[in-house]
Image (cartoon, coloured by chain):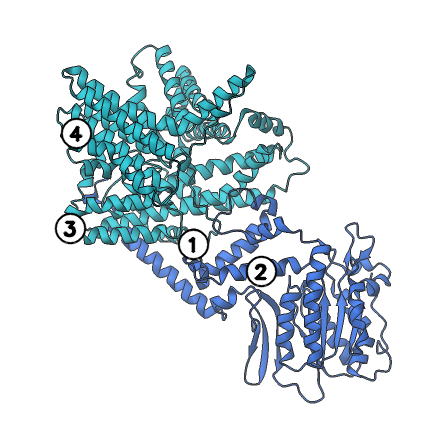
Chain colours: A blue, B cyan
Amino acid sequence: MDLDKLPSARRVVLGLLLALVVLLSLEFLAVVAYDESAAERLSFGYGENTGFLTGKDSVELRRAAGRSLWAQKFPLHKPDGTRRIVVVGDSVLRGGSEAGSLSGKLRERLAACGVTAEVWNLSSPGYGSRRKQLVVRKALEFQPDLVIYHVNYTTEYEDEREWQRKLSHASLHPRLWPEKLPLIGRIKLSKTEKVLWKWLPAEVRNARGTQEEAADPDAEREAIQSKQDAAYWMPRMLGQLQESVAMIRHADVPLLLLSRADLSPDRASIGDAGLHQQLEQFGSDKKIRVLSTKEVFGRLPAFQNLFIDTSHWIPAGHAAMAVAMMPAIADLLELHLQSGNCGRAMPAAN
Amino acid sequence: MSFATWYYPFFIAAVAAIFWALPSRYRGVFMIPAAFVFYGYWDIRFIALLMAAAGVDYLSALQMAGQSPGRMKAWLIALLPLGWLCVARFFKRFDLWELLLVGLFCLAFIACYEFWSRRSGPGRKRAFLGLAIGFNLVLLCFFKYAAWFAEGARDGLRAIGLEADWATLNIVLPVGISFHTFQSIAYAVDVYHGKCPAEPRFRRILNMISFFPQLVAGPIERASHLLPQLAFSRSFDWRTMAWGLHLMLVGFFLKVFVADNCAIIANYYFDQVQSGATPGGGWTLAGTLAFAFQIYGDFSGYSYIARGSAMFLGVELTRNFRLPYFAASPSDFWRRWHISLSSWFRDYVFIPLGGSRGSEFRTAANLLATMLLAGLWHGASAMFVAWGAYHGALQVIWRASPWLERLGRAETVIARVSATTLTFTLVCIGWILFRAKSFPDLLLILHGLGVWQAPDAPGISGAWKWLAFHVVPLLGIQFAVINQDEESDIVNLPMALLVPIYLIMAIGVLSSGYLSSQFIYFQF
């Protein structure tokens, strides 16, 4: 190639410029299409207001930046005579749809009992005690009458991983500049979460020599600590939970704690690795009730059928839990119901 | 400094800006500290190595051309590496024996230089050629092979019951030494044969040896091509900038999107093998294919970035790859893979050995010897030698088999596809030899072929999807330019294709998070 007669130099310039224009246009479109800022997106669910769009008269809940809330809309100020209940949890209580989740089923149940109530579903997949605490703090701004808090330690790992990601992305290091772009940043995060983590197991991703500059936080965390190690994660979770409980009680809001339980791999039994026992310490407060998924579902015949997999529930499972919660809710909200189930039996687990 | 770091684009932009802002007569001077910053980023000591190679080349070449720079100047140039190390010791701590060794090297060169420069006649020219080749090879062998030989000696002594711990050498391999010593040797040989005039300015030779875009992993340039361009007399031209950007985009796509992502699969598989595990035949296939595309993306990506960087400075480097995985025969593969090295071995080893001018047996012997040396060039390891021998044997077999020879030259689509598939398969088998660390590892790989996936190995379907995700875009681009030379020829495609390709490349590069700052060929 002769530099004095560079072939197609004009085409290169035109092609590069056109590609740049298209890329910038896509970035601009991404700014318009997505509400949240790069800082919010790169907070990985640790943003204080992420998912809450507070308007003049209403508050909208939406899926945003590491917080996958169902789209919901409520009045900003609680209408007279309406009870406001917030459900904070992980993917289990988030459910497959808002109507089919615990919040939807509770709303139905309360309506059947003649109670006017808003039930906010503030559950997001992978949320552990740290991020739930942020959600609780935000929820308390809207004067709830009751907080239902799903307690679990198996998501602590994800909380920690996302915290590490938030810390590493908080930097203004030039290496991280592409991630702050609206479109490229999203593609990069999606590629990590939906492709890399989904397709390649941590042991493959963590092979020597692949992470020199931009470490894969999932593989790194996995290498340090197993996701399922109760002895490691349980005390961390309980520490955060105590802070959240203190915060809720400080706001004088009653609290219903629900301990998570999982099916054994052979689906023969249901267990919670001693989680419910750990929560009994909170039972001394008259405004706190503790409910065990293991006990609620364990009483039902063919309880396995209430699970989609080993931890998530089908809508009938959410409905069964809503029914089981009614006496505790009635007690905490000082409702005078004719019976705990308002005349309806718990749904069959068939 | 590596190309695949966040700061390299800033570095090349700053260097190019200062370079073009300077009057042309100062550009060459400026390029020396720029190159020293680039190379000294790894280890400031090894800048002395560049000075030594440049000094040996410069003084020997002048003597071969019957010129003399003067005794004082010659001594000063010969002692430059020692002086540099003395200065470097203020900035980096290292053992005094290193200083002593460099001092001995300088004195030995001065002694030889003085001895031969007093001689006259045809022997003098040959002597200085030997001096240039000899000192470059001494540098190369010391850093690259001394530890290997010492280890061999230690093992040999141990076999007869003698302990020899002294034979354990801890020598750090200077980055890119194999490349710039070969470039130096080529310069000396070309001057000897009169193909290239001896350069009268030492600074220009230092520019040639230390030209940072191609310093650490080639392309191995010929002096006749590079030296005239190092006058840096060109005026600024936006077209060269655009081409530089174009080449760098292609290079970063190959390195960051293709190579670094394929490396995850290849590293996992070969690390497992090295730790004694046998993940199974499926993983062997995935790991080998991943490595094939990793090494191609890594090295060709480097070459593109090198060419793009050089283009920013108004210098054109030679093409190093021409779609090698579309080769129709092993010899065709070597005409397309690492062209600057294979042509170096052709011109400076194979042809001087007699090339293909003698009998078939002699040609086969020459081919085997050349490929063995090419294997050894990659490093002091029996596996590299085996890899070179394997490629030599493939070429000999092709030459001996008229059917295979015909297949390689056939024009029909079926024959072409068959020949390409066969060659690619054989090249991939060669990559196993190249990547495996030892012969026991190789046996383990063969042993693991019995089952598709070992029971304790992770699921392989995700690995295939990951591989396809990163290789298919590259193959798409390569198919689009299959009748041309290389990926950068996408510029000849219609604009409706070129713009989306640029877009895919840019997004692929910017959204790839697993950047390895190292290139495989840095270790050679």
Q: CA distance from mark 4 to mark 2?
A: 62 Å
Name the residue type under label 3: Pro
Q: Are marks 3 and 4 in contact (CB under 8 Å)?
A: no
Q: Tell which subunit mark 4 falls on.
A: B
Q: Quadrant of residue A285?
A: bottom right
Q: Which residue lies under the disc numbered 3?
A: B23
Compute the Cα span from label 3 to label 4.
25 Å
Helix, strand or loop at label 1? It is helix
In the rendering, at what x and y percent does residue A292 appear? Answer: 80, 66
Instruction: Point out the tag, 3 or 4, that comes first from the N-terminus.
Output: 3
The secondary element bearing badge 4 is classed as loop
> Label 4: which residue?
B198
Discs 3/1, front: 3
Q: What's the distance in space between the residues labelled 3 and 2, CA to CA? A: 52 Å
What's the distance in space between the residues labelled 1 and 4, CA to CA? 45 Å
**What residue occupies the far front of the structure in this picture?**
B96
Work out which quarter of the rendered image holds the N terminus of chain B and state it: top left
